[in-house]
Amino acid sequence: MDRHVRPYDSAVAQSDDVVVTVIDHRNNNNDEVGAVSLRSARFHDLNRLIQSPPTLDNKVAGKWQNLLLAYKTLGVVFGGLVTSPLYVYPSMQLKSPTEENYLGIFSIIFWTLSLIGVVKYASIAVRADDQGEVLSAMDGIRAPFPSFSKTWVEVLSAVVLIVLFLLQKYGTSRVSFLFSPIMGAWTLTTPLVGIYSIIKHYPSIYKAISPHYIFSFFWRNGKEGWLLLSGTILCITGSEAMFADLGHFNKSSIQIAFLFTIYPSLVLTYAGQTAYLIRNPYDHQDGFYKFIPSPVYWPMFVIATLAAIVASQSLISATFSIIKQSVALDYFPRVKIVHTSSRQEGEVYSPEVNYILMVICVAVILIFGDGQDIGNAFGVVVTMVMLITTIMLTLVMIIIWRTPPVLVALYFVIFFVMEGVYVSSVFTKIPEGGWIPFAISVMLAFIMFGWFYGRQRKIEYELTHKIDVDSLKALLSDPGIQRVPGLCFFYTKIQDGLTPVLGHYMKNMKSLHNVTVFTTLRYLLVPKVPAHERIIVNKLGLKGVYGCVIQYGYADSLSLEGDDFVLQVTNSLQNHVRDSSDCAQSTTSLDEEIDDIKEAKLAGVVHVRGKTRFHIGKSCSWFDRTMLAFYEVLHSNCRSSLPAMGIPLPHCIEVGMHYEV
């Protein structure tokens, strides 16, 4: 059997009629890794899946391509992180803004950026990729305009976000091309202001790099210092996008941008802010705008405003990536996924997700418009994501990377303790807006669990009632089953058997076409599948019954309309019949089989697919009734798993079947 149609373990079942497959790019054989289904992949498949390199291979892209991508990351990946100086100090309720306290706060910020940003995300988390794969700082605009109406700030923020979401359909490359100059200007100018502020106000600020200042800060302030951590954690908000936005760029470009621009820019900016505040201790509520020198105030204000506008881009792009991966893993209802790049598989856009996210963000601004409440919500989200990432990376180190236990323990203890302290602090803000992400998370979790539960029950039914070749032979031996003229494409997703819909169809229609091709669509994570690998056929051991796998990439146009597709399949069938003939098969029978294929095509072509639903029996528990009913609602409102293939409606037949549970 051809290596591309190697059957999977019988436990593997994919979304309706479409099999998602990963190609391992680390060798020249393009060996198949397996279906993208973590819950059913064997261990060695999971090992290869996690460790696979980015889609855009560094060796192919070259150093100049990486530098270009690094520049583009400024407008997408690091918007939220690099604009954090706008709101970190204003978010703190400092009761005693002394020199010692400011030195302690800067020391906390420096080590948070260094450990979580440099070590955890830029050095470790970005390695755990899969095939290379909360709101902005607009509230800072109010700072230079104390009389600016809160309502107008909220309306302006909502309008800006709507415009930002409307730009998403043009793709990450175009959006980053538009935004990167803005973020590049911000990243380069703020550290220059920071250096000026350090020289003018407090040249010895970098003594605070010593962890001694952290210990003395907590020794002096106790509980108050612990509560202030809910503000300092905002200095690292957006760093999680380095991992979540991997699919839009690649590991090297993100590391280059962070280590050589973002990290030094943030350290210098926070150092400059702190130096200014040491000499002006009661200005922390306007801690960013007041430390800017008067001659460059308005240019910096314009840059800061533009940077705040695009700061949400990193999380928007990351949301598309996460939803795409969740759909591929069959953990989320199917939504439309548009690939906006012919070279980068992870660069995606989902219109449904985009507009739902837009409505949620605008609603949060208009309902919970106070910047403090939204900041508290953001802090809760960031710390929880960081803590969960630490736990998951620990599992990856143990199970996948086989990291020495000493290093795993060192990593886990340092980051779990550090982030655990942050979590304990921000949890005090749950009544003050921190509950918002929990409410949204509960809704999303319920949707994901309902979809996953329904899919699992459907997979169990299909694997239990699947039809193998022997069962099909028994069905065809029934004298009541007639072979009718024509060519039938019967779509199935089970690769080591046939869909139960086939038995339902034959028992009720009492027929099967003379030539029936059981067709599986296989989506590969490559731009385009070569023509000679697009259609792969094999004989199933019964007269006129064949298997066919149609492989396509994310940049391929998949259309089954017209004679071109049918001609390609029938030609492939004829060639396969000739190539697979053995000495025992006479020339006459070989010609007859080829003639049967030609005659079936001339008699007419039909495409048959199943449309299944659950029939909930009286013996079902209330839990099954509730979850399966919810799944049916989701299934009825999500997109079809078959891509838009342009099958003419007169040639398409949907066979309905109830799966009884």
Image (tube, rainbow, N blue to C red):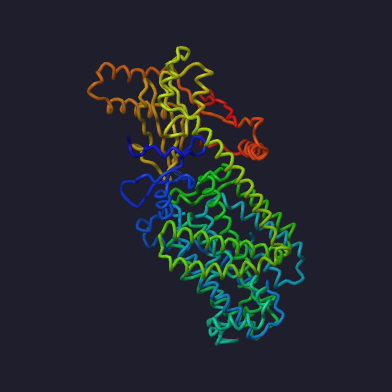
Quarter of the image where one finds residue 405: bottom left
- Locate residue 642, reporting x and y percent: 51, 35
Write the residue at 49% across / 60% down. Answer: 393
- Locate residue 319, reporting x and y percent: 57, 53
Write the residue at 54% across / 77% down. Answer: 268
- Locate residue 177, reporting x and y percent: 51, 58
Q: Quadrant of the C terminus?
A: top right
Q: Nearer the viewer, residue 20 or 78?
A: 20
From the viewer's perspective, is residue 257 above or below residue 344?
A: below
From the viewer's perspective, is residue 474 above or below residue 273?
A: above
Quarter of the image where one finds residue 113: bottom right
Q: How many marks?
A: 0
Toward the left, the furthest residue is 583
Q: Nearer the viewer, residue 255 or 298?
A: 255
From the viewer's perspective, is residue 439 above or below residue 583?
A: below
Write the residue at 61% across / 70% down. Answer: 421
Q: Is residue 124 left or right of residue 216?
A: left
Quarter of the image where one finds residue 299: bottom right
